[in-house]
Image: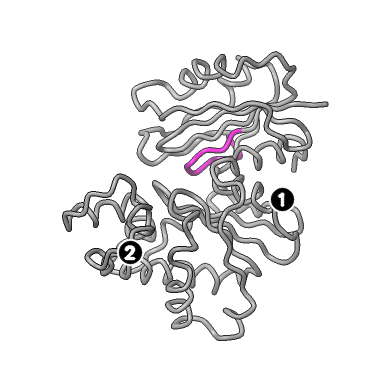
Amino acid sequence: MKYCLSIDIGASNIRLAIIDEQYKIINKVKEGTNKDLDLSEQIFLLYPKLNNKLKLEVVSVGVAGSLDFKRGLIRDVPGLNIFEYDLKSKLEDSFKVDVIINNDASLGAMGEYLMFDKEGVFQYITISTGIGGGLVYKDKLFKGHLGFEQEIGRMIIRDNKTFEQLCSGTALKLNLIKANFNFKYPSDSLVNKDAKHQDIIKNWVSDLAIGVSNVIKIINPSIIVFGGGLGKFLDYYKEDLVIELSKYLPTEVLTELLLEKSRLEDDNVLVGASYLAFNKE
């Protein structure tokens, strides 16, 4: 049996897992992302907590940011002040194995893809601290020219504001705070149906529908899976989202489209990373 180290680097948390070639998680650890530590240093400090005695074949990393595949660099990670960072070389020097780095949303897409019927065009959208996307078609991750594909959080929705600025968990939390609603997590506002804050949720779903419909118009996927801190609560706003989507999409497109929530939740990037580790594209 072969094993890989999967790493999920997000703006809020870093997750590490030992995963076998059948995509089974052997062990995993998580801690909050420390903005005061060098990124590789935090990984090296967290890794011993896995108590791993297995031989690693490869390290596969998902990063919440844009990448330069030609130079093997992390261009930037929003919220972490990381720019032009060579994580690949640092990890290869330490672990003495090949290191693969990809966008976290793309790996999340691949992880979820393994859990669903592998037919048609598979779109993944993560709604968490930020917003990102990943596209899988015929068992392959879609890759753009310079690693800037599926940066859907950067699309302009209205008033010169991006999808991420309007619909991320960070954005929803700020809007709730401005209106003096102090939920511990933004997702709590979706579960709690108190009428007092429903105008905020209604506006959030309205903006979400514009962003999602734009993705559909460009990609025309057969399925969209929603993940991340807010995406996995799809059941609480799916009906309203479909109503809003109907304003922008032909009936036949919406009727044939499956909208699903994540099946792997917080593990999808880790599992997707292991898939790429053992099936190098």
Asked which quadrant contains residue 95, the reply is top right
- Per the image, the residue denoted by label 1 is 114
Q: Amino acid at mark 2?
A: Lys
Say which label, 2 or 1, has the lower sequence index.
1
- Find out whether residue 68 is within the magenta segment: yes
Q: Position of residue 44 (x, y in %)?
A: 52, 17
How many numbered discs, if any?
Answer: 2
Query: Secondary structure beneath disc 2?
Result: loop
Task: Say which quadrant the N terminus sits in.
Answer: top right
Q: Residues within 10 Å of mark 1 (few under 14, many from 20)?
A: some
Task: Say which quadrant the C terminus sits in.
Answer: top right
Left or right, 278 with respect to 18, comes to right
Which of the two residues, 261 or 64, is positioned nearer the viewer here? 261
Alpha-carbon span between mark 2 and mark 1: 33 Å
- Find out whether residue 18 is within the magenta segment: no
- The range drawn in magenta is 61-71
Left or right, 162 with respect to 269, comes to left
Query: Image height check: is 84 above or below 250?
Result: above
- Residue at the farthest right position: 1
- Residue at the farthest bottom position: 251
- Per the image, the residue denoted by label 2 is 193
Residue drawn at point x = 41 percent, y = 34 percent:
83
Residue drawn at point x = 61 percent, y = 45 percent:
107
